[in-house]
Amino acid sequence: MNADLKRRRQPALVRTALLDAVIQEAVLGGLASVTVLGVAARAGVSKGALFHHFPSRQVLLEAAYAECLLRFGSELDACMARDAVEAGRFTRAYVTATFEAMTSSDRSWARFSLTALVEPAFADLWREWLAQRLENAPSERLDPRQRAARLAADGFWLQMLSDPAAQMQPDQSDALLACILTLTSPA
């Protein structure tokens, strides 16, 4: 059985390949450079197969961004599950997951997240996602120390993506992470 026929019988694999292709295309040339033909070619599927899964370029881009949020949410949940202290748990997980994402060898989904934020619809998705997550941690939502920690993590994320010369050695990143996490401890 050839690979194309086998993949056609596994739509989840095709969908994953398409979403990964969107992320790769956006990281290479920015969000504006993502085309239906380029994504289909990178994923190794026809344009028709792409449209079978995603009826438009916008739906495809939104699905890729939703996948990024899903991945980050899974990392966040894993960090929260390892944390026995309830006070500040969400923010510690947010900070830790951000640092882990930005110091991993494959930051493509994180880079796509930043690229996508220039798109107003994606910025709205991000705000809605964060607000929804913070609903489960109401004491952290407006706490200035928790908010400062989340904003510091966002700043680290932005610096790591926008200024390659500023990328730190692991011990510097660890020290910065430890410093930011002190904000999440009860005052």
Image: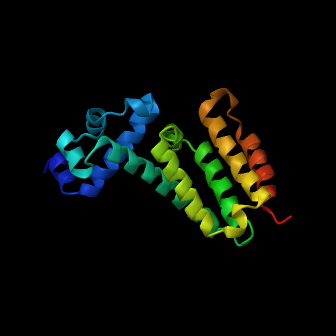
User: Compared with residue 165, is residue 157 higher up or lower down, i.e. above or below?
Assistant: below
User: Compared with residue 168, is residue 56 higher up or lower down, i.e. above or below?
Assistant: below
Name the spot of residue 71 as percent of width and height, x first: 49, 55
Residue 46 appears anywhere in the view: no
Q: Residue at x 58, y 63 (%)?
A: 133
Residue 170 located left or right of residue 12: right
Which residue sits furthest right? 187
Residue 124 appears anywhere in the view: yes
Name the spot of residue 115 as percent of width and height, x first: 50, 37
Q: Nearer the viewer, residue 171 or 83?
A: 83
Q: Residue at x 65, y 60 (%)?
A: 93
Q: Quadrant of the C terminus?
A: bottom right
Number of numbered callouts drawn: 0
Name the spot of residue 142 as percent of width and height, x first: 73, 61
Residue 124 located left or right of residue 22: right
Q: Residue at x 66, y 68 (%)?
A: 137
